[in-house]
Image (cartoon, helix red, strand yellow):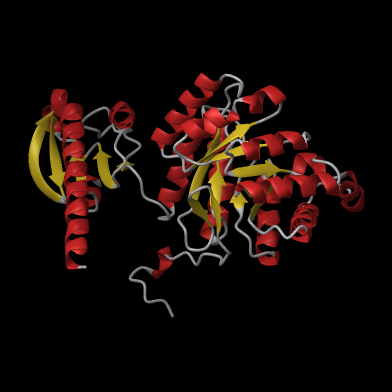
Amino acid sequence: MSSSIRPWRDIARRQSRQIMVGNVPVGGDAPITVQTMTNTPTEDIAATIDQIRRCEDAGADIIRVSCPTEESTRHFDQITRAAKIPVVADIHFHYKRALEAADKGAACLRINPGNIGSSDRVAEVVRAAKANGCAIRIGVNAGSLEKDLLEKYGEPCPEALVESALDHIKLLQDHDFHEFKVAVKASDVFLAVAAYMGLAEAVDCPLHLGITEAGGLIGGTVKSSIGIGSLLWAGIGDTIRVSLSAEPEQEVRVGFEILKALGLRTRGVRVVSCPSCARQGFDVIRTVQTLEERLQHIKTPLSLSVLGCVVNGPGEARETDIGITGGGAGKHMVYLSGVTDHHVQDADMVEHIVRLVEAKAAEIEANVTDAGKATEAAE
């Protein structure tokens, strides 16, 4: 029996054991982490670090960097030292890149044991991971399933993906390695979700969610939201990566929006806004676009409602920290903590809202700091 005030919002999270990716816990009762991947040439150290910085600012918890060549790992330690978040080395085919990355500060090695070669090579990667305190992420992908499984099942199917994952898990466990998480990705949403559902029942390790090759910003966001969102809603998933043909910062933002929509993480300004219609007292679409851009620097969780007219405006404003509702003659009503407070003119509206949000964020942060100090004093 649920003791929650709103049981229809509760998500019963799958129990998994917890691993550490660098200093970030994944699985167990740890927050669901958001990952992305750099797309700069890894050999270009400055460009890669610059992109990692932008992803850190967007809220990324973990970042993956591809290591396809010997040159890409030669100065990999410069990247891992510069990053403030754990770096996962993405390895395909060349197992020596995994050994080099582990030695140079990778927090996790992303490998597909099936395409890395023999059991001896997997054993070498495991030894390097153990020696350097690295986790391993087993990455099963519908596009690169082993030939024997394709022959057995005839096509990539949920059972084939799960069997591949279990084979890889056994490889690691046979070498007494247990600090791993697993992904069974596919570009087909139905296939990916069914595979993750099956894997979730079969194992207790953390699961890394993703719909691979999801597409561009809009199409990929929709596919990822349906796939990843369905699994998270079912309580499955410990870390997520939204794969978009877009800049990695966008992947991070979409990942956080999925988590925010399900009440699993909070970060930055949650905007409630209407699609706009002929009743609008100001240009809602352009205003929201501008505000989202101007408020990206806010990391404190708070809510802002932007509605064009008084039909739903007051009701939504009652539920948000700050609200604005369109009025006549370019004069709009501002709500603070759900209560009508003052009016603002059209020309001043965006600047005014930005200042209010920044002030509210500072107030929340100050209260958190004061509460922390009071707790310390009491102890």
> Could you tell me which residue is drawn at 43 percent across and 44 percent down?
257
Q: Position of residue 347 (x, y in %)?
A: 15, 23
| Residue reaching furthest to the front | 131
Q: Quadrant of residue 345?
A: top left
Quadrant in the picture for the C terminus: bottom left
Q: Position of residue 95 (x, y in %)?
A: 76, 37
Inspect this view and state whether residue 139 appears: no
Left/right placement of residue 356 relative to residue 179 reads left
Q: Position of residue 232 (x, y in %)?
A: 53, 56
> Could you tell me which residue is drawn at 54 percent across and 58 percent down?
27
Task: In this rendered view, identify the residue nearer to me: 202 or 40.
Answer: 40
Quadrant in the picture for the N terminus: bottom left
Left/right placement of residue 28 relative to residue 341 reads right
> Could you tell me which residue is drawn at 41 percent across and 76 percent down?
2
Q: Position of residue 301 (x, y in %)?
A: 30, 47
| Residue reaching furthest to the left | 342
| Residue reaching furthest to the bottom | 1
> Could you tell me which residue is drawn at 68 percent across and 64 percent down?
203
Task: In this rendered view, identify the residue nearer to me: 55 or 295.
Answer: 55
- Count of all numbered marks drawn on residues in the image: 0
Left/right placement of residue 202 relative to residue 16 reads right
Inspect this view and state whether residue 14 appears: yes
Left/right placement of residue 362 relative to residue 219 reads left
Q: Quadrant of residue 372?
A: bottom left
Task: In this rendered view, identify the residue nearer to me: 214 or 308.
Answer: 214
Q: Quadrant of residue 325?
A: top left
216 over 203 or under it: above or below? above
